[in-house]
Image: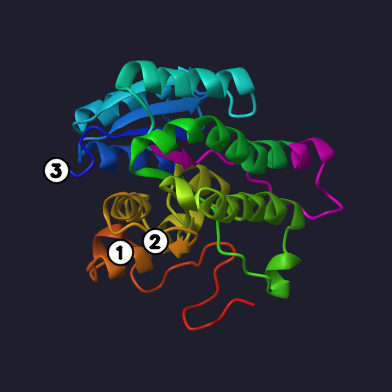
Amino acid sequence: MGTALAGRTIVMSGGSRGIGLAILVAAAREGANAVILAKTDNPDPRLPGTVHTAVEEIEAAGGKAVGVIGDVRVEEDVQRAVDTAVSTFGGVDICVNNASALNLSSTEELPMKRFDLMQQINARGTFLLTKTCVPHLKKSGHGQILTLSPPLNLAPQWLGAHPAYMLSKYGMTLLTLGFAAEFAGDGVTANCLWPRTTIATAAIINLIPDAAEASRKPEIMADAAVAIFTGPRRSGETLIDDEVLAAAGVSDLSKYGAGSDFALDLFVDPPGTAAN
């Protein structure tokens, strides 16, 4: 158990499972508090974990946590989550934009309701949660925004692969880079974090059953996030998980799985290939 994040409070959208929960558990080991805004009040037979089981895991790891049942698209729910962080823990130090909707359908095949859902959860949700946290982040003295979104790779194969999803994820990234510039004088940093490889979450394995062997474990993103939270302050960067760990002195990634035969995540080109 560490103390690097003792007394600091994270507000996260989503986080009842997968990468988000892994980040909160890793932060809890360093003493962090967490407020989780998520819709999973009851178990989904396809996806294990609820807000309640997430709270249990975070507290078992040494942190304190509160689950708020709500939707990142709903202003009242987001305000309630932030108010809960302030009333329970005294403020907000870190805002993590984790909630995300995924649909890789082509332009011709994607229903508009699915297009709207991705823009509302991904881009609008990032804006709303950050906007609501910012007054408290400014008071923190070490306020941070971390968004789980990719580098802006404008290579044609990514621009043309699934434009609607790309728009929603690049929207998250552009907003975060904008926050970094907007709040540069307020002591608030903003960065993006994205995995080099596909990550073996239940959602990905359900979608692509053979993906597990070529995917790294969610803990690689968790450890990278904690390295950002606790390391030298940086802002306005789009970061890749294994590069963050390398800068923190971690060279052995074997515990995260996949080995050298890993599957690259979306919007990430092979090492040594520059994004346009």
Q: Position of residue 82 (x, y in %)?
A: 46, 24
Residue 47 visible, this orientation:
no
The tag on residue 245 is 1
Task: Give how far apart the Cα atoms at labels 3 and 1 are.
Answer: 18 Å
Q: Mark 1 and mark 2: span between their CA atoms?
A: 6 Å
Occupied quadrant, residue 258: bottom left
Q: Which residue position holds label 3? A: 2
> Is 233 in front, or is 101?
233
Instruction: Tell me: 200 left or right of 152.
Output: left
Secondary structure type for disc 3:
loop
Tell me if mark 3 has few (under 14), some (14-19) or many (20+) residues whose alpha carbon lies within 10 angstroms of its own.
few
40 to 3, vertically: above or below: above
Q: Examine the image and state in which quarter residue 215 appears.
A: bottom left
**Residue that appears at 39% across and 59% down:** 234
Whether tag 1 and tag 2 are in contact, CB under 8 A, the answer is: yes
Q: Residue furthest left?
A: 1
Looking at the rendered structure, the secondary structure element under dot 1 is helix
Q: Total label count?
A: 3
Give the image location of residue 32, x and y in percent: 26, 35
Q: Nearer the viewer, residue 144 or 14?
A: 144
Point out the tag, 2 or 3, that comes first from the N-terminus.
3
Q: Residue at x 57, y 47 (%)?
A: 207
Please provide the residue range marked out in magenta. 94-116
Q: Position of residue 3 (x, y in %)?
A: 15, 41
Question: Which residue is farthest bottom?
Answer: 272
Which three-letter amino acid code belongs to the residue tagged 2?
A: Asp
Q: Residue at x 68, y 74 (%)?
A: 155
| Location of mark 2 (residue) | 241
The image quadrant where one finds the C terminus is bottom right
Q: Give yes or no for residue 210 being in the magenta stretch.
A: no
Of residue 103 and residue 124, the one placed in the foreground of this image is 124
